[in-house]
Amino acid sequence: MKFCNALILVFCLAIVISCSKKSDPAPSLANATISFGKSGQIVTPPSALGNSQDTHALEVYGDLMEINSLINYTSAFTIPSGVIKTTTPIVGVNVGGRVASTQQDYLVYIWSDPTYGSVAYQVSETTVSYTFELFYKATGATVWVRYLDAEEKKDKTSGFMNIYDPTYTKVGPPDISYVWTRGTNTLNFVITYLTYTKIVVNYNTQTKAGDIEAYESNVLSEKLTWDTLGHGTWTDYDTDGTTVISSGTW
């Protein structure tokens, strides 16, 4: 709950301050965008999944909605207006040397509120990809904490996003990690929670069909499949990841 409240506070600060007067954007980096935008859906589940009374069908629906929740974070990568602009990169205290020699250019926007603190939006690039980062500095603090970190290829074929607790100032793994890959009419997502729980989602953008594999400590625990109508199958596995405990359809 503390993690969620802290993220809500930081996002509110970003939204409120970024509604101020316009600034002159720098070329290239100022126009860099990450996939999935600021609204809408990334994946559209068959309607039968959300209307089903089957717990496994509802599990699939919930996992697909988790993918769509990524927009709550990608929408935060917006160039604010009326702020301090610099090309000097920021390195968060919880990062441990994030600035890479391969990064060619940086554009950093910083805005503050006397009550809530400061937020910095940083975008950088290499020849093949853009990196997007958000940092938070509490009122009275002297160090920045990175709470969002994303990178995507410029051709949009693949990318990732890491979400950190903005109140935690030590170097550590993200609380949630999203990794995506685009294929021909396909999207693959890997969502990892605190490094030990993971779901792998394969989704067909044309038929809306797909499958999900769930892992606990990298051991397969469940597999779910569904078709274009929202009908599907489920299989639960023992702790060895191969022995089937139970299975069924909906």
Image (cartoon, rainbow, N blue to C red):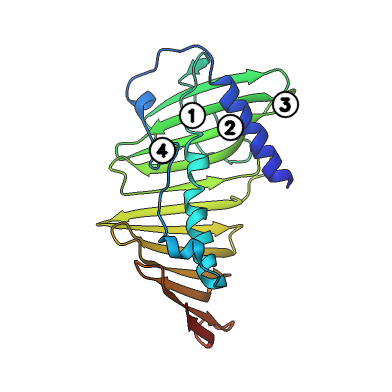
Name the disc covering residue 232, or none: none
**Image location of residue 197, percent across then percent down:** 58, 64
Judge by depth and name the residue closer to the eye, 171 or 186.
Answer: 186
Residue type at the position of mark 1: Gln
- Give the residue at mark 3: 141
What's the distance in space between the residues labelled 3 and 2, CA to CA? 13 Å
**How many residues crowd mark 1 within 10 Å: few (<14), some (14–19), many (20+)?**
many
- Residue 199, percent across and down? 50, 64
Residue at mark 2 to residue at mark 1: CA–CA distance = 8 Å
Q: Which mark is residue 135?
A: 2
Dot placed on the residue nearer the N-terminal end, 1 or 4: 4
Per the model, the C-alpha gap separating discs 4 and 3 is: 32 Å
Query: Mark 2 or mark 3, which is nearer the start of the sequence?
Result: 2
In the drawing, does residue 151 fall left or right of residue 55?
A: left
Pointer 4 residue: 37
Q: Earlier in the sequence, mark 1 or mark 3?
A: 1
